[in-house]
Image (tube, helix red, strand yellow):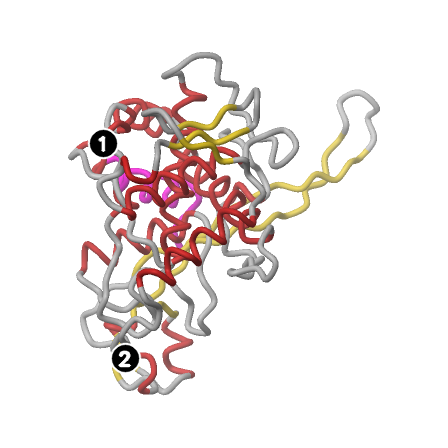
């Protein structure tokens, strides 16, 4: 088992290494070869999606090791399904968080009080590309898309409309206005592709979830470019990537956000827990957007395998 400090450092250092090369690791995990989907979150052996920091970490490992399948499982789960991890294969780190109760003396009253202490542990999972002998469906190739491009656009339009966000079109800038609570988008025709339009809309709609009436997300930002601003932009970047995976959108890098890489690097180097916090906040934002749908497109996975910030939302 990786200890707590090692879990934070191992994942954060991988992301820092990519960012230092100008690469956003959450923008690379797309593969059209597998039946589980062209664009998907990493999935457990039972088809349930991973959440929070596990999405980023397993995406990065899939890209680094060239896996085409999005499905992961432990050594024991593979054995129970009749499979065997191939000789010489090395697993990937997955994490889960929980709390333990500590009894201590209250400094003011001298009485014993109980306090919940969050902790994180790591465990090893293997991609199905590393396992032989599993049931055939785990190796199935991708099927032809069932939706036409026109139907896909209609589905995306319906998804964003169902959130109830006020979306205005016009001008040359895309942004979310906190004070007036609306999203401003350039005209659809102004974008180079529909993918860029919907990726940008996903980013701004993630920002929209931060309003006090919704998730009340505030990192103490006071001016453009400060640490709080950088954290909120990181949450929106991750939220847009998670939405792309859930809605079968093609993710697009916003070139105007290249300037944020330096500020993200500073935040991540100063606080090894920051990416865990950002991923957890992005998870909550996307879950809110799904729950605003008449029939939620993605059931939230509530378990202990989420980032520590499900118990401790802010960077510590």
Could you say which is closer to the camera, residue 285 or residue 274? 285
Based on the displayed image, in which of its 4 quarters is residue 45 positioned? bottom left
Q: Disc 1 or 2, which lies upstream in sequence? A: 2
Residues in magenta, as a range: 1-16
Q: Is residue 105 left or right of residue 61?
A: right
Q: Residue at x 22, y 77 (%)?
A: 86
Q: Residue at x 26, y 44 (%)?
A: 252
Secondary structure beneath label 1: helix
Residue that lies at the very extreme toward the top in this rendered image: 223
Q: Is residue 3 above or below residue 81?
A: above
The N terminus - image quarter: bottom left
Q: Position of residue 87 (x, y in %)?
A: 20, 75
Q: Position of residue 21 (x, y in %)?
A: 15, 35
Secondary structure beneath label 2: helix
Q: Is residue 311 left or right of residue 23?
A: right
Q: Is residue 107 above or below residue 59?
A: above
Q: Is residue 110 left or right of residue 300?
A: right
Q: Position of residue 55 (x, y in %)?
A: 38, 53
**Residue 59: mark:** none
Based on the displayed image, in which of its 4 quarters is residue 118 positioned? top right
Q: Is residue 76 left or right of residue 104?
A: left
Could you say which is closer to the camera, residue 77 or residue 173? 173
303 magenta-colored: no
Could you say which is closer to the camera, residue 107 or residue 258? 258
Q: Residues within 10 Å of mark 2 (few under 14, many from 20)?
A: some
Q: Is residue 23 above or below residue 49?
A: above
**Residue 255: mark:** 1
Q: Residue at x 40, y 38 (%)?
A: 203
Residue that mark 2 sits on: 139
Could you say which is closer to the camera, residue 65 or residue 243? 243
Q: Position of residue 255 (x, y in %)?
A: 23, 31
């Amino acid at each position: 088992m990786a200890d707590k400090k090692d879990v934070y450092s191992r994942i954060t250092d991988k992301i820092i290494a990519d960012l230092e090369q100008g690469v956003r690791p959450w923008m690379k995990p797309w593969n059209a070869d597998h039946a589980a989907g062209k664009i998907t979150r990493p999935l457990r052996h039972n088809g349930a999606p991973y959440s929070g920091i596990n999405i980023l970490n397993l995406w990065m490992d899939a890209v680094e090791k060239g896996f085409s399948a999005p499905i992961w499982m432990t050594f024991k789960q593979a054995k129970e399904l009749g499979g065997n991890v191939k000789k010489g294969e090395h697993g990937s780190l997955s994490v889960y968080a929980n709390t333990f109760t500590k009894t201590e003396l209250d400094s003011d009253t001298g009485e014993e009080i109980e306090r919940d202490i969050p902790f994180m542990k790591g465990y090893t999972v293997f991609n199905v590309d590393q396992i032989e002998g599993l049931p055939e469906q785990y190796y199935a190739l991708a099927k032809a898309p069932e939706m036409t491009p026109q139907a896909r656009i209609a589905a995306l339009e319906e998804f964003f409309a169902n959130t109830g966000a006020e979306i205005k079109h016009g001008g040359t800038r895309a942004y979310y206005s906190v004070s007036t609570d609306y999203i401003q988008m350039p005209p659809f025709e102004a974008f180079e592709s529909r993918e860029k339009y919907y990726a940008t809309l996903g980013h701004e709609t993630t920002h929209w979830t931060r309003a006090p009436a919704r998730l009340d997300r505030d990192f103490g930002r006071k001016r453009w470019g400060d640490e709080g601003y950088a954290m909120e932009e990181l949450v929106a970047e991750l939220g847009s990537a998670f939405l792309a995976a859930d809605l079968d959108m093609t993710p697009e890098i916003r070139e105007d956000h290249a300037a944020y890489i330096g500020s993200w690097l500073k935040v991540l180097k100063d606080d090894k827990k920051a990416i865990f916090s950002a991923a957890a906040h992005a998870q909550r934002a996307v879950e809110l957007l799904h729950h605003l749908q008449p029939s939620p497109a993605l059931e939230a996975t509530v378990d202990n395998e989420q980032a520590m910030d499900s118990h401790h939302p802010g960077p510590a």
